[in-house]
Image (spheres, rainbow, N blue to C red):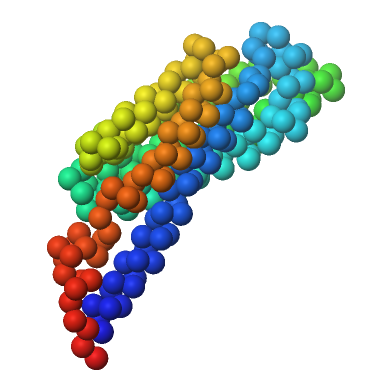
Amino acid sequence: MAISTATEESHVARRAARIGLWAFPLYGVLLGVSTLTHQPSIDDFDAYARYITTDLFLLSHLGASILGAAFAILGAVAVTAFLVHGRAAHTAVVGLMLTVVTNVFMAAAFGSATFVQPGIGRAHLDGVPGMPALNADTAYGPTFFATALTSSVFLILAAGVLGAAIARTTPRLRWLGIAYATLIAAFTLCGFVLQPVQAFTGFALAVATAYLAVLLPRTTPSTATSDTGGAVSAAPVSS
């Protein structure tokens, strides 16, 4: 009876992980949507203030960037659930840990922008003096830059480690692991040097991870069979 219960629980967990895999394509879509427009340079503070007080700015940070970080974590958990019984288990776990920690810090950086910048922008547009200096000390202060830049570096590192785990699992997944690592790195770097194409890398990530969500469950064994060498499905159940 215990074997039957364990098998049923394994199947439930696998179904949950299969659903969780679709968090990664949603993450990619949100990355793309959130970078279709970019805020003006703070050198033109009037244009900057107008942009950061729009509903678009608020929604892109709350609904796309912060929610996207949550989807990234859920997707990494789901991928690791499939990889943890394979040849790249240790690499997958390290990639998961890096992804979780990195996206928590990324969400903190986006939260700073979401809740600080609009107030500064509204004050500037209302004629309150000193807002550029306040913006430079808070929204764009050294703590923010340290958090954002460090998180960006670790986001690339986390994607590389988890992508390597995906690629090492089976030859059928190799190019998807490479695509995952490459596209997240490209998205991150484009935010600094090539913003007009950043959204396209996010949408490309959505396509690649959607294919991963379909292919990964078909190329990895279930937890029950991998733990018992297939004995669970064939073992008699005693009452």
Residue 114: give x, y in percent of width and height: 64, 34
Residue 215: give x, y in percent of width and height: 36, 44
Residue 1: give x, y in percent of width and height: 26, 84
- Residue at the far bottom in the pictured view: 239
Reply above or below: 239 against 76: below
- Residue at the far right in the pictured view: 126
Q: Observer-nearest residue: 56 or 121?
A: 56
In screen coordinates, is 47 left or right of 36? right
Picture quarter containing residue 195?
top right
Picture quarter containing residue 211?
top left
In screen coordinates, is 94 left or right of 134? left
Which residue corresponds to the image point at 49% horizontal and 24% vertical from the top-left?
201
Reply above or below: 69 against 74: above
Which residue corresponds to the image point at 42% horizontal and 59% vertical from the top-left?
16
Residue 77: give x, y in percent of width and height: 38, 49
- Residue at the far top in the pictured view: 43
Q: For the C terminus, which image quadrant? A: bottom left
Picture quarter containing residue 155?
top left
Residue 16 in sight from this viewpoint? yes
Residue 108 in sight from this viewpoint? no
In screen coordinates, is 237 left or right of 205? left
Which residue corresponds to the image point at 53% horizontal and 22% vertical from the top-left?
200
In screen coordinates, is 118 left or right of 214? right
